[in-house]
Amino acid sequence: MTISQEKLDAQALETLRQYFGYEDFRPGQGALIHAILEGRDVLGVMPTGSGKSLCYQIPSLLLHGLTIVISPLISLMKDQVDGANEIGIPAAFINGSQSIDEQEDVFAAANSGRVRLLYVAPERLETQRFVNFATHADIALVAVDEAHCVSQWGQDFRSSYLGIGDFIDALPDRPTLAAFTATATERVRRDIIQMLRLRDPEVVVTGFDRTNLYFDVLKLGTRDKANWIARYVAGHADESGIIYCATRKQTEELADTINALVPQLRAASGAGTTPPSSPIAVAYHAGLPPAQRERAQRDFVTDAVPLVVATNAFGMGIDKSNVRYVIHHNMPESIEAYYQEAGRAGRDGEPSRCTLLWNESDIVTRRRLLDNGGANERLTEDEQEQVRRWKRHLLDAMVGYCRTTACLHRYMTRYFGEDGDASSGAHCVGGCVNCDSTFSTTDVSRIARTISRCVHDLGQTYGSGKIVAVLRGSQAKDVLERGLDHAPTFGALADVPQSTVRDVLNQMVSDGFLTITEGRLPIVMFGARAAETIDPAFHYEMKSITRPKPASSPCPSIPAVE
Ligand code: ADP
């Protein structure tokens, strides 16, 4: 290291202490800041809450020239700018809500050095006014927040991110480029480097094992999920939590259920009631009017309501450190999405719990959504098929997380390609339900084979309800009226509980032995692996888990939930 580099590192540390009041850098921060100050492009892959913003805020104070931050959410910019100004970093943003005069004022302040950190949304880079400004400005650094949005292989692809590379190339002096993301697999990382045209970047990947998080996975029937959640919330009334749902409608329904049920549960247990004027849960999704969304977010962040029930629209950039639990009402579409959402628990480092509720029909729904997903006009048919295949691969990894009996921490860190050393010891750091449980596997080969035969008997023309009814020998009127009692497999699984037949059928769908067609009356048909079930050597298993005894509920008469 040369003298001047050492001096820059010392200045960076001094800035950290002076402006932020922290003693030391967290893992990754020092290396990233060092590279940026040297004029090297960087890619920082660090979990949510690990301190990515500081990696461009500190250089913005030390570099000669302006730092532009490209950030996807206009709604967050004001908070980010306020936060920076509060600690003494002169920051501003440019967005469409400002008048032309206001924008010109900001440009003038940036040109004169009165603003050192300028936040913009990627769409802004395409406007002539901004391009004019940027062409004449002295830009030292462009930081791209949530850089995975540039990748078609990730969850949150934004076509406006594709313009960033051209924007940079069109500048008379190429600034240093710093890309940051919380979640990126190897494939997405490569894509970020290529699409943003990073030059020989310093890539830093840190700390994906969140050791203060307890990971829990629980298979529950759709109808049981709301009750389970209400009991959990009632038992953790003093804690802050986020519940993620798959649809907007679910968020509103579940928030209503919680607000109705939790006071009853608590009153019944003598644990006290919440005054009716203050709801326990608020719903949050992109379809709500902006004022209502902002209020929900504010109430949650300020602890006025303990719980937000949200779609994945909630959370990007929300800085609330004391979230004690995150519950997923449905299985997300990828480990990235899950990790990012679950990772909003415990940002203060205190023990927190991440629970994923799932069932086979979640998987079936996800697969169906994926196969019938909207087309992206920028891509050819071939490319769309490639993207679909990749997304199937992401989904398979998520399904694997639900089904694995291995340590959930290790599953995560391996997925993110982080060196497994930190969590490869004998015990699971932070804890997870798999390390605390015992598992047994049941051989369900006969059941699976019989289900497959029944689908054949019925000519691949009936839904799962009829198939289960026939297999169990139901005397229901419509089974008899259609003559289904003459099917060779009628009553063949009368000795097996209905719920087991249903579970095995659903698992066969999610494993590709069967498929369910799209439409008003979904029909069970053979899937790509159907032929395997007639192989005499066919062997099929279902796992069952004996979970640890739940810790006793803080409210003794509220049934503790596992
Ligand atoms: P990210 O963008 O990675 O989600 P933030 O930049 O919002 O994370 O930082 C999360 C929190 O961590 C903030 O409250 C920030 O002030 C704090 N933080 C960042 N760096 C440090 C550090 N070196 N020491 C202590 N706290 C830090």
Image (cartoon, grey):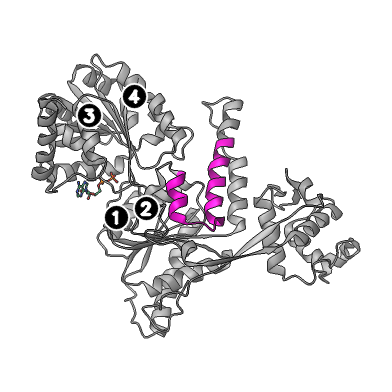
> How far is mark 1 from mark 3, CA to CA?
26 Å
* First in sequence: mark 1 vs mark 3: 3
The answer to whether residue 292 is seen in the rendering is: yes
> How far is mark 1 from mark 4, CA to CA?
30 Å
How far across and down, in percent of the image, does residue 214 sit? 39, 61
Q: Nearer the viewer, mark 3 or mark 2?
A: 3
Q: Are marks 3 and 2 in contact (CB under 8 Å)?
A: no
Q: Are marks 1 and 2 in contact (CB under 8 Å)?
A: yes
* Pointer 4 residue: 198
* Pointer 1 residue: 347
Q: Amino acid at mark 3?
A: Ile
Whether disc 2's CB lies below 8 Å from ligand 1 is answered: no
Whether disc 1's CB lies below 8 Å from ligand 1 is answered: yes
Q: Is residue 45 above or below residue 454?
A: above
Regarding mark 2 in the picture, which secondary structure is present there?
Answer: loop
Classify residue 330 as left or right of residue 115: right
Can residue 406 be found in the magenta stretch? Answer: yes
Q: Amino acid at mark 2?
A: Gly
How far across and down, in percent of the image, does residue 196 sit? 36, 25
- The segment highlighted magenta reads 389-415
> How far is mark 4 from mark 3, CA to CA?
12 Å
Regarding mark 3 in the picture, which secondary structure is present there?
Answer: helix
The answer to whether residue 98 is seen in the rendering is: no
Q: Residue at x 58, y 48 (%)?
A: 366
* First in sequence: mark 1 vs mark 4: 4
Whether disc 4's CB lies below 8 Å from ligand 1 is answered: no
Residue 36 is labelled as 3
* Pointer 2 residue: 343
Q: Amino acid at mark 1?
A: Arg
